Amino acid sequence: MSRRSAALLACAFAALAALVAAGSLTQVDQWAVDHLMPGASLRHANAGLIEGLVPLLHSRWGSAYAIAANIVTLPASFLISLAIVVACSRILGAALAAAVAVEVLCKEVLTRPALYDGSFHVAVFDSSFPSGHALRTVIVAASVAWRWPRVRSFAIAWAIASIVLLQLAGWHTPTDLAGGVVLGALALLGARAARALGGRRLAARA
């Protein structure tokens, strides 16, 4: 069942990436830019490597949505999420690292048709698929829920709030977020398979 689920998720991610690159979902993302990003500062967005690594570096604080997104999504920033996930499980930490590698590769090779804020070309969205924050949110929430089952409901609520705020604050488009969620889920299935394989090897040695 896990193999089938993983195959379906991998196909879904590949299909979504292809549709984004081909422009088939551009209207969806453009509508979101026009109507679902009330807290966005699209003309001052940053998407450099350093901004991705250092929590809150060059973050915008000009709206309530931006403030909420900066605070709520902080555990999903790269270094903090890595520390949380590795503390919960080394296998999940490896899964996170693999997912981030896929994210970076996709952003290097995939370019979507231009999105606009009025007449302004929002260049930061050209190579923003998939959302690293969304994939890390999924993995962090799952890691915390696995390590501390009593806070599972809180972890799920935090993940939902984070992904919604990423949209409202204008950090990512809907297809970016969908891609990040699917990639995060795929990484979790990979970690589950690796844990099961390790358990079978230990049993065989016993």
Image (cartoon, rainbow, N blue to C red):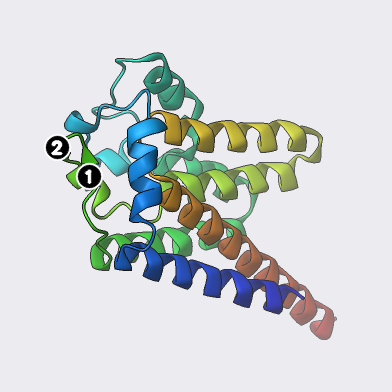
Residue occupied by mark 2: 120
Q: Is residue 82 above or below residue 158?
A: below
Q: What residue type is labelled 1?
A: Val
Q: Quadrant of the C terminus?
A: bottom right
Q: Say how many tags the image has.
A: 2
Of the pair 168 and 140, the residue shown nearer to us: 168
**Residue 6 visible within the image:** yes
Of the pair 115 and 56, the residue shown nearer to us: 115
Residue 151 coordinates in the image, percent (x, y):
75, 33
Q: Which amino acid does label 2 sit on?
A: Phe
Which element is circle 2 on?
A: strand
Q: In this view, does 161 lie above or below 3?
A: above
Can you tell which quarter of the image residue 202 is in?
Answer: bottom right
Left or right, residue 62 beside residue 81: left
Residue 64 coordinates in the image, percent (x, y):
41, 14
Of the pair 86 and 54, the residue shown nearer to us: 54
For the point 58% across and 65% down, the residue is 186
Residue occupied by mark 1: 124
For the point 44% across and 26% down, the residue is 69
Can you tell which quarter of the image residue 137 is in?
Answer: top right
Q: Residues within 10 Å of mark 2 (few under 14, many from 20)?
A: few
Of the pair 178 and 48, the residue shown nearer to us: 178
Q: Quadrant of the N terminus?
A: bottom right
